[in-house]
Image (tube, rainbow, N blue to C red):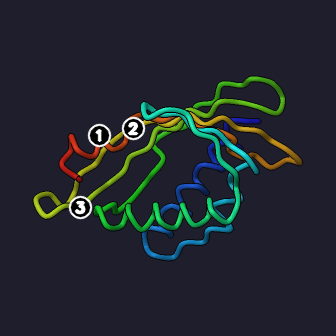
Amino acid sequence: MTNEKIKAFFDRYAHFFEQSLDGKIDTNEISSLYAQEFIAASPLGVMAGKNDIQFEQTLAQGYEQYRKIGTKGMTVRGVSVSPIDKLHCVAHVAWTATYSTADNPNIAIDFEVHYLMQELDGKPQIFGWIAGDEQKMLKEYGII
């Protein structure tokens, strides 16, 4: 997987995220970015999930929650790739999230997420991710 292919993948991911913040969520498109099964790790622990109707419902609820707390945008600042083999890599994605609160209409927060990627039939997909403590960060910035 090339850096360019992974960068294009996450640009597409960010586009779907932005659409979802505008209330135009397409759970089929977003879920197509994920493998049939996946893992996630954060300071809260490790979880495994399936890319099914429940996942799509969870995505829709998550985007609704992002809108409720004042999320205005999510952009990719940069992507670097650590290859594992011909079909797998870790994509280190630097994001900037923007929020609006009653006290501050323009809060920008930079963070990184590390995605486990697999390419099958020429199509990259996320099969896992490792993220920091989002809730703690949102509290520190006064978002929640």
Q: Which mark is residue 111?
A: 2
Quarter of the N terminus within the rendering = top right
Q: Is residue 126 above or below residue 26?
A: above
Q: What residue type is labelled 2?
A: Phe
**Residue in the image at 10% along x and 59% along y:** 103
- Residue drawn at 76 percent across, 51 percent down: 36
Report, in whole angstroms, how far the alpha carbon at label 1 lies from the one at label 3. Answer: 15 Å
Q: Distance between the residues labelled 1 and 2?
A: 9 Å
Say left or right for 68 vs 105: right
Q: What secondary structure is marked by label 2?
A: strand
Residue furthest bottom as drawn: 24
Identify the residue position indicated by label 1 in the image. 137
Q: Which mark is residue 100?
A: 3
Q: How crowded is mark 1: few (under 14 residues within 10 Å), some or many (20 or more)?
A: some
Indicate the quadrant where residue 67 lies: bottom left
10 Å crowding of disc 2: few (<14), some (14-19), many (20+):
some
